[in-house]
Image: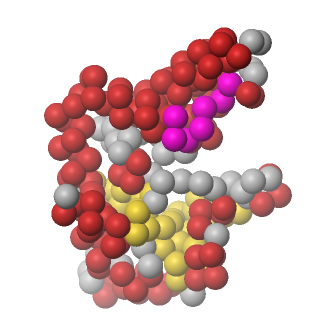
Amino acid sequence: MNLRRQEQARLRLAQEAARLMVDESIDDYRWAREKAAQRLGVHDKRCLPRNEEIDLAAAEYARLFAADEHQERLARLRKIALEAMEFLQAFHPCLIGGAASGTVGEHTPILLELYADTPELVLKRLREAGIPFTEGDFQVYGKTPAATRTCPKITFLVNEVPVELLVFPSAARAHPTGGRELPRLSLKQLRRLLAQ
């Protein structure tokens, strides 16, 4: 495949992955990239777009198809995330996923990474505040299949919006989300963003 065709395929893949992330509330870049490649029949790995290219395509997609709704939804999710992060400040929360990158759809949850010595500390904080929650697990995909691991996920609702807490061991703060590159906002960064 020549360079021009490769760039065209990369752009089409970025646009399709962005559409999937916005319309279907997908937060996993790798999964969106692979699904877009499958749908478009692109098999050349050199054509796969970077996360930043998908983010740019998602911003353009939202601007073209749902600018006002998108901005309102994004602002609402970020305000709820700020409230949750302030409540969970002791666990060094980071906002990830669509609310961090700006690729929010109608059913996008708020995803927060937390760091605790044990997940029970987070559960105790929620119980003490009288917040109902559900427990589950999530997969953290590392750079290799051997690096994949399972971590606790705690979900609760704020104004009918799911807030998903992905709980990592405190020692994992040096390598957030299993080393994957994701848009992330600390509490300080989110406050600054919302103040603009």
Q: Nearer the viewer, residue 164 or 128?
A: 164
| 185 shown above or below 7 | below
Q: Tell which residue pokes out farthest to the right in this image.
A: 146
Task: Answer whether residue 94 is magenta in the image.
Answer: no
172, above or below 165, in the image: below
Q: Residue furthest front?
A: 3
Compared to 18, does 153 lie above or below? Answer: below
Quarter of the image where one finds residue 107:
top left
Q: Position of residue 97 (x, y in %)?
A: 45, 51
Instruction: State which quarter of the image contains the C terminus.
Output: bottom left
Give how far across and how far down residue 161 sits, in percent: 27, 54
Query: For the N terminus, which image quadrant?
Result: top right
Residue 85 image offset from top left, x and y in percent: 33, 72
Apparent side of residue 132 relative to residue 134 in the rendered image (left or right)? left
Rendered residue at 45%/38% (across/down): 55
Relative placement, left or right, of 91 versus 192 is right
User: On the rendered structure, is 124 left or right of 119?
Assistant: left
Q: Quadrant of residue 126?
A: bottom left
Q: Does any portion of residue 156 appear in the rendered image? A: no
Q: Quick check: is 50 in the magenta stretch? A: yes
Q: Report the residue at 66% width, 63% height from top.
A: 178
Residue visible at 31% across and 64% down in the picture: 190
What segment is highlighted magenta in the picture?
A: 47-53
Q: Which of the two residues, 133 or 193, is positioned nearer the viewer here?
A: 193
The residue drawn where x is 21% and y is 41% is 71
Q: Is residue 113 above or below residue 109?
A: below
Residue 88, percent across and down?
36, 79
